[in-house]
Amino acid sequence: MKRSILFALVFAIASNLLPKTVLANETFDAVCAACHTGGLRGMISGAPNVKRPDAWRPHLSQHSPDQMLRIVLNGTADHKARGGCDSCSDQQITEALEYLLSVVQ
Ligand code: HEC
């Protein structure tokens, strides 16, 4: 009994100590990764790959994180609104973008 409480405590502390960038983001994995991790849809669409920070440099120099959020939320001629995820909340899209930026910056 005592041991399981101790284990739960150690686990809770350890998971809080993990840097956020190590933990992937669910919305990113479910929605954005299809195009932004260099797979087939990424190649077809020409989406910058999160594994290649140099591919993000032109985007980062042209748009602030706020502008990027607007691009992703509202969509542009080059970008589907919410990456095509109509059921995603603003909060989920914001967190997916924060995760993406933490990886490429
Ligand atoms: C259907 C493929 C596709 C999906 C899904 C997708 N993207 Fe993109 N994304 C693109 C393409 C293509 C570009 C490059 C064109 C452009 O600049 O808008 C891009 C560019 C971007 C940019 C850079 C915009 C700029 O020019 O500053 C950001 C940020 C971004 N995507 C975030 C996301 C996020 C967050 C998600 C998930 C919610 C997502 N994308 C889902 C295809 C996709």
Image (cartoon, helix red, strand yellow):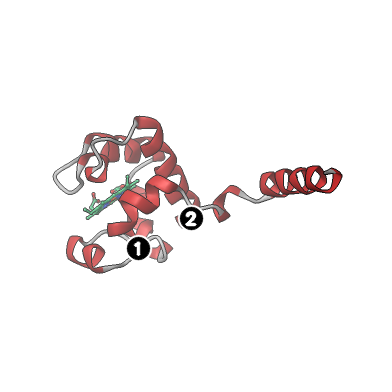
- Residue wearing tag 1: 37
Q: Where is residue 64 in the image (x, y as percent from the top left)?
A: 38, 40
Q: Which of 67 and 31 is in front in this view?
A: 31
Q: Which of 90 and 103 is in front in this view?
A: 90
Residue located 34% across and 32% down the image:
89
Q: Where is residue 99 in the image (x, y as percent from the top left)?
A: 46, 47
Q: Position of residue 62 (x, y in %)?
A: 32, 47
Marks 1,2: beta carbons within 8 A: no
Please give the label number shown on residue 103. Answer: 2
The N terminus sits in image quarter: top right
The yes-or-no answer for disc 2 within 8 Å of ligand 1 is no
- In the picture shown, does residue 34 fall above or below 90? below
- In the picture shown, does residue 72 fall above or below 31? above
Per the image, label 1 sits on a secondary structure element best described as loop
Q: Which of marks 1 and 2 is nearer the N terminus?
A: 1
Q: Where is residue 36 in the image (x, y as percent from the top left)?
A: 32, 58
The single residue placed furthest to the left in the displayed view is: 77
Say whether residue 10 is left or right of residue 96.
right
Q: Which of 76 and 80 is in front in this view?
A: 80
Residue located 31% across and 67% down the image:
38
The yes-or-no answer for disc 1 within 8 Å of ligand 1 is no
The single residue placed furthest to the right in the displayed view is: 2
